[in-house]
Amino acid sequence: MTDKTALTLIGLGPMGQAMVTRFLAAGHPTTVWNRTPARADGLVAQGATRAATAAEAVAANRLIILSLTDYAAMYDVLDGADLAGRVVVNLSSDTPDTTLKAAAWLAERGAELLVGGVMVPAPLVGEESAYVFYSGPREVFDRHAETLAVIGRPDYMGADHTLAQLLYQAQLDVFLTSLAAMLHAIALVTSAGVTAERYAPYLTDVLSSLSMYVDETSQHVDSDRHPGDLANVTMMGATAAHIVGASETAGLDTALPRAVQALYDRATEAGHGKDSWTALINVIRG
């Protein structure tokens, strides 16, 4: 017997498996289900209970955690299951609008949705650096916060179901764009015979330096004041054009640097030439 909350976790990709391992280690009785049953074998060996069907997995517990590709998969998995009285913590990625529709769909079936976004890769689930955005009814979050803390620090963003999804996508916006920029930069230097390994220390340096801009950028955006004393739109835009030119000379795909250049061009056209590069926020907002 245990006083730890029993739960069901559906979706046993790398992230789902990592979460189940953490819940079991923390003493939470955990029922699992996956379309490919073999993915549960190692978890059953650790003490998880395998459900034969998704409906059986849902029936086993009141707390249901989903680790699926997107919200469409939720409908496929949960349609036909008895969801009355369940709390569904959906950790899948999707758009805010899709999230709202899912909340309504679950409410019609007597369930409550808690939206989540896990902000670490599978190997770091449950580690000190792990955190997860959540949004939805405060009472539902408070009821399960201690259990959810097993997989990472639970950061509650508000009652609006879309908030956790927005924060999750915002973080990945930075992450995915940075990864693409990193590869583009590597392609640029390697086109001249410089190895990626030789360039790596300099790449590390510039990526590390980005954090120093966060506080000032936040202040400029929140105040809608963009003093351009150090780095204005005209100057930065000229550099953006040079990057496009260098990429063309190297024979590289220019879609990414051209997208950046376009932001500066539109900011200049809107009269922000002497403002800080942070004035691009007005172009991005449309």
Image: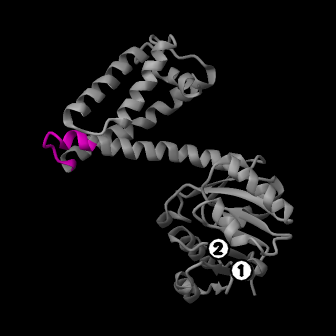
Residue 121's place in the image compared with 214, above or below, is below
Determine contact: label 1, label 2, CB under 8 Å: yes
Residue 179's place in the image compared with 235, above or below, is below
- Mark 2 crowdedness (10 Å alpha carbons): few <14, some 14-19, many ≥20: many
Q: Does dot 1 land on a helix, a strand or a loop?
A: helix
Residue 8 in picture, x, y percent from top left: 70, 76
Residue 39 in picture, x, y percent from top left: 53, 81
Of marks 1 and 2, which one's residue comes earlier in the chain? 2
Task: Judge left or right: residue 143 versus residue 183.
Answer: right
Amino acid type at circle 2 is Ile
Task: Judge left or right: residue 123 versus residue 61.
Answer: left
Q: CA distance from mark 1 to mark 2?
A: 8 Å
Amino acid type at circle 1 is Ala
- Mark 1 crowdedness (10 Å alpha carbons): few <14, some 14-19, many ≥20: many
Quarter that holds the C terminus: top right
Q: Is residue 232 visible?
A: no
Q: Which residue is mark 1?
A: 57
Q: Does dot 2 land on a helix, a strand or a loop?
A: strand
Residue at (60, 19) in percent of width and height: 224
